[in-house]
Amino acid sequence: MALSGPAEKLALTLAEGGLQRMTARVLAALLFTDQETMTAGEIADTLAISSGSVSTAIKSLATVGLIERVPAPGSRREHFRLREGAWATLMSGQNAMIGSLREAAEEGITVAGAGSLAGARLAEMRDFYDYLWRELPALIDRWRDDKGDQ
């Protein structure tokens, strides 16, 4: 079974957004499957890709918290699924990157000088990431609260 048109479109969109192409395709396969879980072999068969590509993608997706390994009684193979709350987990993990970008901008201002043109551009960058740093956790918490009410 190959990915559907919408699944391939999602994978392409994710790849354009910075995800490795095969990682995006593996994520799309896990999102669009009607199965509760998939093995690496099932993913490889679905996408007609090598087991090595699947393994690399699974490591990447598990590291950022989007997927998880799950026990499958009676099976000797590892099974994977999209983690519950994966998107909020992913965005929560982005706080480290936001903090790093904010700090890099602050260091750049120190080097370039606050009154310089570069300093002004870097100050806007710092202020934007500072805003995200403060607001993103509360936004994610509100989303989780709203989701719990449904």
Image (cartoon, rainbow, N blue to C red):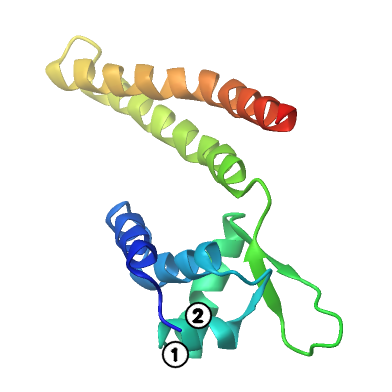
Q: Residue furthest right?
A: 73
Compared with residue 122, is residue 73 higher up or lower down, i.e. above or below? Answer: below
Q: Nearer the viewer, residue 73 or 102?
A: 73
Compared with residue 61, is residue 58 higher up or lower down, i.e. above or below? Answer: below
Horizontal side of residue 90 vs 23, given as left or right: right
Question: Label 1 amino acid?
Answer: Ser
Question: Label 2 amino acid?
Answer: Val
Secondary structure of the residue carrying tag 1 is loop
Asked if the residue under mark 2 is in contact with the one under mark 1, i.e. CB atoms within 8 Å, the reply is: yes
Distance from Cα at disc 1 to Cα at disc 2:
7 Å
Q: Nearer the viewer, residue 140 or 105?
A: 140
Q: Report the residue at 47% width, 83% height from top.
A: 46
Q: Report the residue at 53% width, 81% height from top.
A: 43
Horizontal side of residue 69 vs 65, given as left or right: right
Percent x, y of residue 23: 44, 68
Q: Quadrant of residue 38?
A: bottom right
Q: Residue furthest left?
A: 117
Secondary structure of the residue carrying tag 2 is helix
Q: Report the residue at 61% width, 63% height from top.
A: 62
Q: Which residue is mark 1?
A: 50
Residue 10: mark in rendering: none
For label 2, the crowd category at 10 Å Cα-Cα, with few meaning under 14, some 14 to 19 and many 20 or more, is: many
Q: Which residue is mark 2?
A: 54
Percent x, y of residue 143: 61, 28
Q: Quadrant of residue 61?
A: bottom right
Percent x, y of residue 145: 70, 26
Percent x, y of residue 123: 29, 17
Q: Quadrant of the C terminus?
A: top right
Q: Nearer the viewer, residue 145 or 23?
A: 145
